[in-house]
Image (cartoon, grey):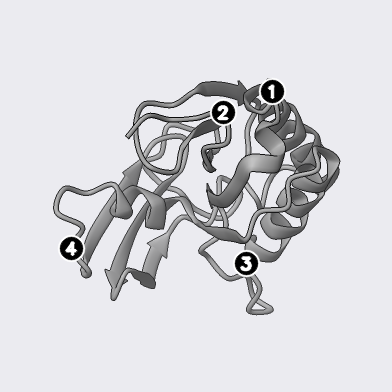
Amino acid sequence: MTRTARTSLVLGIDAGGSGLRAAVAAADGGPPLATASAGAGNARSVPERLLVQRLAHAVGEVLDAEDRAARVRCVVAGFAGAGVADAAGHGGRGRARRALDAALAHHGVRAAAVHVMADSEVAFAAAPGTPPDGLVLVAGTGAAAVRIRGHRLAAAADGCGWLTGDDGSGF
C-alpha cells in the first residue's frame, strides 16, 4: 500500500527522569517520520508547568510539517512517576495527563485516543511477542520493578523517585 499525504499518524512519547522523547509515525507502520527530545519528563518530580512546556516543545518538533497535527489519531505516552501512588493514593498519572492534554491542545491535536501510562508499561509493551503477563525491571535514572498482568500494571516495587527511593538508580 502506498502512503498518501493523508495517512493517519500515531504519536508516541517516552517521558523519563533524564529526558523526554517523542516520535510520530504512520499508523499503518514504518519508521518514525520525525523524532524530538526535551528535558526530564518525570510526572512526579518535574513541575507541571515545566512538564507542559517540555511536552509542547517535543510535540511541536515532531508535528512541524504539513498537516501532521490534524492527522494524529492516537497518542500513547509513558511517564516515569505515573505508576506509583503517593500516600494519598494518587500517582503522577493525573499530572501527566493534564500536562499532555495541554501540550496537545497547544498544537491542535485532537486524537481519537490518548493513553497515559507508566513508563514501565510502555517498556513491557515493547517486549517481543506481546505477552500479557510478566515483569519489568527499570534501571536508569530511576529504579523500579513492576508486575504486568493482562497488559496492565499490577504491582510495583520502588520507582518512588529520588527523594523517597529508587535505591540503585542512576540518579
Type of residue at label 2? Ala
Q: Is residue 47 visible?
A: no
Tell me residue 88's x, y (percent).
69, 79
Pick whichever, 151 or 114, lies toward us.
Answer: 114
Q: Do the residues labelled 2 and 1 touch (CB within 8 Å)?
A: yes
Give the distance between the C-alpha atoms of the residues marked 4 and 1, in whole angstroms.
37 Å
Q: Can residue 63 be seen in this view?
A: yes
Of mark 4 and mark 1, the one earlier in the sequence is 1
Type of residue at label 4? Pro
| Mark closer to the observer (2, 1) | 2
Of mark 2 and mark 1, the one earlier in the sequence is 2
Give the distance between the C-alpha atoms of the residues marked 3 and 2, in whole angstroms.
39 Å
Type of residue at label 1? Glu
Q: Do the residues labelled 2 and 4 touch (CB within 8 Å)?
A: no
Quadrant where the N terminus lies? Answer: top left
Pick whichever, 16 or 3, lies toward us.
Answer: 3
Residue topped by disc 2: 5
Give the distance between the C-alpha atoms of the residues marked 1 and 3, in whole angstroms.
36 Å
Determine which of the numbered discs, if any, sits on residue 119 in the image: none
Tell me residue 39's x, y (percent).
65, 26
Look at the numbered disc 1 and give the secondary structure of its residue: loop
Of mark 1 and mark 3, the one earlier in the sequence is 1
130 lies left or right of 84? left
Residue topped by disc 1: 66
88 lies left or right of 161? right
Residue topped by disc 4: 131
Q: Do the residues labelled 1 and 3 touch (CB within 8 Å)?
A: no
Mark 4 Cα-neighbour bin, 10 Å: few <14, some 14–19, many ≥20: some
Tell me residue 68's x, y (percent).
65, 32
Determine which of the numbered discs, if any, sits on residue 91 in the image: 3
